[in-house]
Image (cartoon, helix red, strand yellow):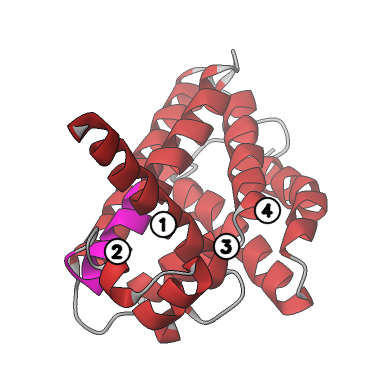
Amino acid sequence: MTAKRNLSAEARRERTVETVIALCGEEEPATLTTGRIAQHMGVTQGALFRHFPSKDAIWEAVVAWIAERVMARVGAAAEGADDPLDALEAMFLAHVAFIAEHPGVPRLLMGQLQHPNPTAASRMVRGLMTRYQRRLLGLLENAQHQSRLRPGLDLNVAATQFIGCIQGLVLQSLIAGDVAGIIDRAPAALDLYLHGIRADTGGNA
């Protein structure tokens, strides 16, 4: 009986997280209330708080859900490639696909980073970005060791620009009101990025 209750509680927590992400794709995350979340789920706020001690705890669970899935998705994509530049390409496209599937994610993460005072959730977002950048740097270092990158390339800047490319695509998609369209716009942006870092096509070549 206890196991069933535990599974049920976990399922409800998961449903809450998925609801928040879905709502963030339609509404401004900063104005999202627990009342709105509960209403969308068809439960009372009291029922919601039986599984989360506070609204902050909901945001923390949401960021943890995103971090786990983003890193797993891009990690699997990168590990499936033999070449570090192919791995970067696979990572980029996997990340874009994740955004297309969950359009509320970028708005939610940016909303957390804009908090005037640090919160547990905003610190988790920064931690995710650090882990993501570290993975990028590992691939870029491998590419550099194989002489695949243009001479003098700043790897930290290259990693930051990779993330910036994706953020730019997100912004374009939000302005266009077509987040799913990010899939179609991604290849050209990726090609431009790779052109700028490759030894055979970069600025010094």
Residue 155 percent across, percent down from the top left: 43, 42
Q: Are marks 4 and 2 in contact (CB under 8 Å)?
A: no
The mark found on residue 167 in the picture is 3
Spatial CA distance of label 4 from label 3 is: 13 Å
Q: Is residue 202 above or below residue 189?
A: above
Residue 149 percent across, percent down from the top left: 57, 32
- Sequence-wise, which precedes: disc 4 or disc 3? 4
Residue interval drawn in magenta: 53-64
- Sequence-wise, which precedes: disc 1 or disc 2? 1
Amino acid type assigned to the residue bearing label 4 in the image: Ala
Q: Secondary structure at mark 4?
A: helix
Of the pair 9 and 84, the residue shown nearer to us: 9
The mark found on residue 100 in the picture is 4
Q: Are marks 1 and 2 in contact (CB under 8 Å)?
A: yes
Spatial CA distance of label 3 from label 1 is: 23 Å
User: Which residue is labeled 1 in the image?
Assistant: 17
Of the pair 62 and 7, the residue shown nearer to us: 7
